[in-house]
Amino acid sequence: MPSAKVLKAKQDVVAALADKMQNAAAGVFVSYSGLTVEKDTELRNNLRAAGVEYAVVKNTLTRRAAEQIGYTEFDEILNGTTALATHTSDVVAPAKVLSEFIDKYKEESGLTIKAGFMDGKACALDEIQALAKIPSKDTLYAMLAGGLNATIAGLARAIQAVADQKESA
């Protein structure tokens, strides 16, 4: 039995991890076995640039934190090396950055996605991969603005054509 001080420290870690998972819009668990220091540094820089929080987590403490907030599906994947990438507002960012990194380095990266969660629901590997293919929020906004602009420009050209036709008549 651990001392009261060690037990309290572990309980604090579990509570903080549970809070982080509960407040995250999305999170992805990865195995980083075989990842070199150089590639890990690059990955962390990419994640930081996207506003994603990334940390190596202890499986037992993560399992307890997940159970506290109702995620029982992660028991199978919480073994071996495990890290957790979360974002508080963008559901696509963690999966997108991790998938792009894995695609960039293929097998030499040593990084594999285990599972994840989004908006209070556990997600399997195929759901995380599908999520990674969705454009970012900024890209979607740009696409929407472009579509609206094209529609308005088309309307303006049509109105101008009618005005030009009436002038010439």
Image (spheres, rainbow, N blue to C red):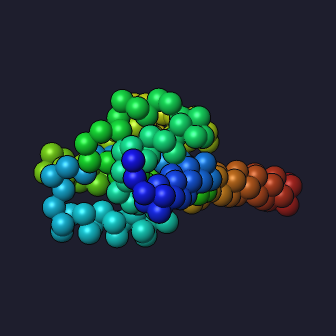
Residue 74 placement: quadrant: top left
Which residue shows up at 58% across the image and 57% down it? 88
Position of 119 with respect to 95 (left or right) is right
Residue 148 seen? yes
Q: Total number of numbered labels?
A: 0
Position of 155 with respect to 35 (left or right) is right
Which residue shows up at 34% across the image and 66% down it? 44
Place of residue 97 in the rendered image (x, y in percent of width and height, measured from the top left): 38, 55
**109 and 64: which one is in front?**
64
Place of residue 108 in the rendered image (x, y in percent of width and height, measured from the top left): 13, 51
Place of residue 106 in the rendered image (x, y in percent of width and height, measured from the top left): 18, 47
**159 and 102: which one is in front?**
102
Residue 132 seen? no
Residue 102 drawn above or below residue 44: above
Residue 146 drawn above or below residue 30: below
**62 and 114: which one is in front?**
62
Which residue shows up at 48% across the image and 48% down it? 27
Position of 54 with respect to 107 (left or right) is right
Which residue shows up at 51% across the image and 45% down it? 65
Quadrant position of the C terminus in the picture: bottom right
Place of residue 123 in the rendered image (x, y in percent of width and height, measured from the top left): 48, 33
